[in-house]
Amino acid sequence: MRFYSVLLLAIVVFSCASEQKNPPNIVLIMADDLGYGDIACYGCDYIETPMLDKMAKEGLKFLDYHSNGAVCTPTRAALMTGNYQQRAGLEGVIYAAKEKRFYGLSQDEKTIAEYLKDAGYRTGIFGKWHLGYQPEFNPTFHGFDTFYGYVSGNVDYISHHDGIGLYDWWNNTDTSYEEGYVTDLITNHALDFIKENKDQPFFVYLPHEAPHYPYQGRNDKADRLPGKEFKHHGSREDVTGAYKEMVEVMDENIGRVMDLLEQLQLDENTLVFFCSDNGATKAGSNGELRGFKGSLWEGGHRVPAIARYPDKIQKGSTTSENVLSIDILPTVLSVAGIDSEAKFDGIDFSELLFNNAEVSTRPVFWRYRNQTAVRKGKWKYLRIKDEYFLFDLEKDLQEKNNLVYSQTAIADELKKLLMEWEEEMKSYPQQTN
Ligand SMILES: [Ca+2]
């Protein structure tokens, strides 16, 4: 009898320990410039995205998810640090131009990859970094064990040359020469990484290039070649057709990741989060939203996001809770069971993922070039140059009805919050390209 009690106790203790030893894998997939109306499960009727639609059917679709930036670099700084990009001094884009390529994510910043690596995760990034060209900014110095991809804002999908014609394809800190279409290549490397690390917790960050320009399909010729002049956006004239193909090929490749997780029987213990880094350009669609990439109208930063984690997240659910890029790091740490003393601007929304709980109506802020915005609950206060707006986003998602002169008490409250936030951000010097 006593033997059995001890055995039972041993089994209980062992199973608890093994549970702790089996933290979930995290797969974070981010599209580049994908708009709120660019995939079928968000209402697009000319681009087919069966894999993302399936992910939404099996998981949670966000209707009020926002990138912290209206352009690439700032969102990535926010995503990596869990804090407003301004704290890292990266409010603007890091451009390829030779005189502008000296900025980057400081070693003083602790990234999501570093937190996970410290907790025993294997960490890999496959795709676009865009947080610094210089060697010291390489993702392998920011917590990633493995890096395949490019450090600039965009490369030719076939030749892998950046916006000023420099070759930009890397394996860790070394230049890598390999042939292939960017979307396929980064997925191949992500799949290899998952296979190699299937027996230990891993973090895969898969920042896609699609559907950012140059607008090139899988079978197109390279546009950017050494010594040859090229059009920045590529040579294809049917941009809409190329764009559709780029999104569809990305979707197909996301399907390959999901299939592998299932084949390896890892999908039950893997949180997959998909999002975009800012709204679409005029080549794509932000659905009914006003504005495009680069603007603080909703179309610049309200973007698709989907979370999938079988048995943990309710299938086919949607949420209208307001969540941002900065919230992913604290949420991932919570899901992975990692305690951290660190304070973040972002919040842990795991209770929203698992129990459909409400997220607090904290104020959240955006600033880019000559625009600032603050959102609290349904209210959004927006400044563009010297014009001021107040919108009730529940009634007016299209931002047509400016209430700044009729709802003055609310406008004043939000303006005060914005001024306080800007005051706090003054202590961080910005590059503001
Ligand atoms: Ca982008």
Image: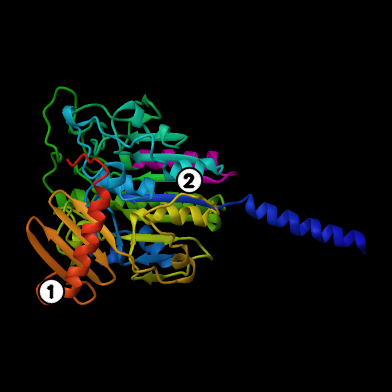
Q: How is the image coloured?
A: rainbow
In this view of the protein, can residue 37 be seen by the observer?
no
Q: Does the beta carbon of the residue at mark 2 sit less than 8 Å from ligand 1?
A: no
Q: Main secondary structure of the magenta part?
A: helix
Locate residue 364 relative to residue 337 in the image: left or right. left
Q: Nearer the viewer, residue 100 or 289?
A: 100
- Answer whether labels 2 and 1 touch (C-beta < 8 Å): no
List the single residue furthest toward the top.
227
Q: Determine which residue is flagged by label 2.
A: 203
Residue 91 percent location from the top left of the image: 23, 45
Mark on residue 372?
none
Kindly give the residue lying farthest to the right in the view shown: 1
Which kind of residue does numbered mark 2 sit on? Phe
Q: Visible in this render: residue 334?
A: yes
Q: Is residue 278 above or below residue 136?
A: below
In the image, is residue 184 above or below residue 363?
Answer: above
Q: Residues within 10 Å of mark 2 (few under 14, many from 20)?
A: many
